[in-house]
Amino acid sequence: MQNLLEIKDAGFYYEEQKFLFRRLNFALAKGETLAILGLNGQGKSTLMFCMMGVLKLKEGEVKTQAKFAFLPQNFSVAFDYSVLDIVLMGRIREISLFSKPSKEDIKICEDALHSLEISHLKNKSFNSLSGGQKQLVLLARAIASRSEVMFLDEPASALDLKNQDRVLTLIRNLKEQSNASIVFTTHQPNHALAVADSTLILKNDLSYVFGKSSEVLNEENLSSLYDVDIRGVKFDIEGKQIPSITQIFSTQK
């Protein structure tokens, strides 16, 4: 299987020798979905920026020739752009300088909005939307780019349960329908378990775990990572065993 990204002996720090991660080795194959988990400040977003070439690694290398799109955690605009204008920004590579978006560009963007069931927001001001609505619009922008690799920084962090399900379904559909490769960060192991082929866990001692999500996302790895009581469970849904992960809170003991 063709690899779109290869990360070799990767290391990065902001303060001299205070590494966020080090000696990372993993790859992203075409059509694969990768989830990245780790504590706050452990370098999940930073690693993503290094993979995109926005930040330069202090050690190691990233090999890629793929076109990519990025969904940030936070995004604000100074001008009063409409939702459609924001989504059209995802087509910037396809629109010549000083040219107007074509009918095809507009249709691609409208289809992206439709896929997230937010077509009704098309003409609204982006700045007037709620945080969750903005997150969905930015995801539509990433979809409209039709990139080979999509980087999504906590794509469901500001969403309610229904919209979390919608985003996860979309990630799965993107993989199945367009063979897009997707990298996303999350604090929700169940999101990784639901849609990610592989998972990378960044630990605070600079060690890491990488492998198939079904194998990596276990009680031992997650309890160690978060220093809480994590339990793996399975539910029988219409004859199919569905794995899930739950935290046992201190107040429940």
Image: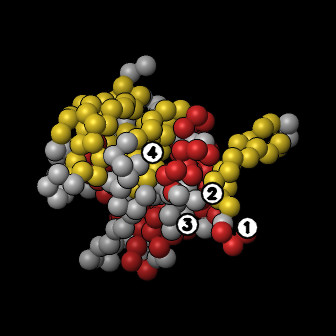
Q: Residue pushed farthest bottom?
A: 128
Q: Quadrant of residue 67?
A: top left
Sequence-first disc among 4 and 1: 4
Q: CA distance from mark 1 to mark 2?
A: 10 Å
Label 2 CA crowd tier, 10 Å (few <14, some 14–19, many 20+)? some
Q: CA distance from mark 2 to mark 4?
A: 17 Å
What residue does disc 4 label?
Answer: 201
Quarter containing the C terminus: bottom right
Q: How is the image coloured?
A: secondary structure
Where 27 sits versus 96, above or below? Answer: above
Q: Can you see residue 118?
A: yes
Q: Give the structural element (helix, strand or loop) at label 2.
A: strand
What residue does disc 2 label?
Answer: 229
Residue type highlighted by circle 3: Leu
What residue does disc 1 label?
Answer: 253
> Horizontal placement of 100 versus 248: left or right?
left
Nearest to viewer (mark 3 / mark 1): 1
Nearest to viewer (mark 4 / mark 3): 4
Q: Are marks 1 and 2 in contact (CB under 8 Å)?
A: yes
Q: Residue at x 31, y 57 (%)?
A: 89
Q: Quadrant of residue 22?
A: top left
**Closer to the camera in the image, 250 or 85:** 250
What residue does disc 3 label?
Answer: 159
